[in-house]
Image (spheres, helix red, strand yellow):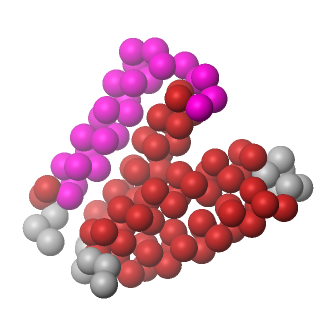
C-alpha cells in the first residue's frame, strides 16, 4: 500500500519520465515515446490524486512540480548537454531545498 508521500514521490518521478518521453516523441509522431509519455502522464496524475488523500493540496502540487522541474533540469544537464553554469545549478538547489522544506514542515 502506498503512503501519500511515496505516491507523491513516484508521481514526481513520472513527471520527469513523461517530459523525457515528450522530447523523444518528435512532436508526438513517434509511437513508443508517445505511448510511454501518455502512460507516464496518466500514472503521474493518478498517483498525485492518491497522495491528495493525506498530503495537503498546496504542498502536494508544489512538491510534484518541484520534482519534475528539478529533475528535468538535471536530466537536461546530464543527458542532453545543457548548461550547468553556477546560477542554473543554484536555482535547482533552491527548488530542491524548497521541495524538501515543504515536506519537513507539512506535519503529515
Residue at 55 percent across and 19 percent down: it is 83
Horizontally, is 93 left or right of 19 in the view?
A: left
The quadrant of the image that shows the C terminus is: bottom left
Mark count: 0
The quadrant of the image that shows the N terminus is: bottom left
Horizontally, is 40 left or right of 101 in the view?
A: right
On the image, the x and y values in percent for residue 98 come to: 26, 45
Vertically, is 44 above or below 91?
below
Vertically, is 49 above or below 60?
below
Residue at 44 percent across and 65 percent down: it is 11
User: Which of 30/106 is in front?
Assistant: 30
Residue at 46 percent across and 43 percent down: it is 71
Residue 53, quarter of the rendered image: bottom left
Vertically, is 3 above or below 107?
below
On the image, the x and y values in percent for residue 18 come to: 61, 57
Residue at 65 percent across and 70 percent down: it is 39
Residue 105, quarter of the rendered image: bottom left
Q: Is residue 18 magenta?
A: no
Looking at the rendering, the stretch of residues picked out in magenta corresponds to: 79-103
Say whether residue 61 is visible.
no
On the image, the x and y values in percent for residue 88 come to: 44, 23
Amino acid at each position: 500500500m502506498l503512503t501519500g508521500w511515496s505516491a507523491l514521490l513516484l508521481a514526481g518521478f513520472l513527471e520527469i519520465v513523461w517530459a523525457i518521453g515528450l522530447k523523444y516523441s518528435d512532436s508526438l509522431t513517434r509511437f513508443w515515446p508517445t505511448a510511454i509519455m501518455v502512460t507516464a502522464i496518466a500514472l503521474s496524475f493518478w498517483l498525485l490524486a492518491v497522495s491528495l488523500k493525506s498530503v495537503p493540496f498546496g504542498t502536494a502540487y508544489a512538491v510534484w512540480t518541484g520534482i519534475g522541474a528539478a529533475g528535468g533540469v538535471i536530466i537536461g544537464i546530464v543527458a542532453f548537454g545543457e548548461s550547468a553554469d553556477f546560477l542554473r545549478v543554484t536555482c535547482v538547489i533552491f527548488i530542491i531545498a524548497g521541495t524538501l522544506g515543504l515536506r519537513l514542515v507539512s506535519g503529515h
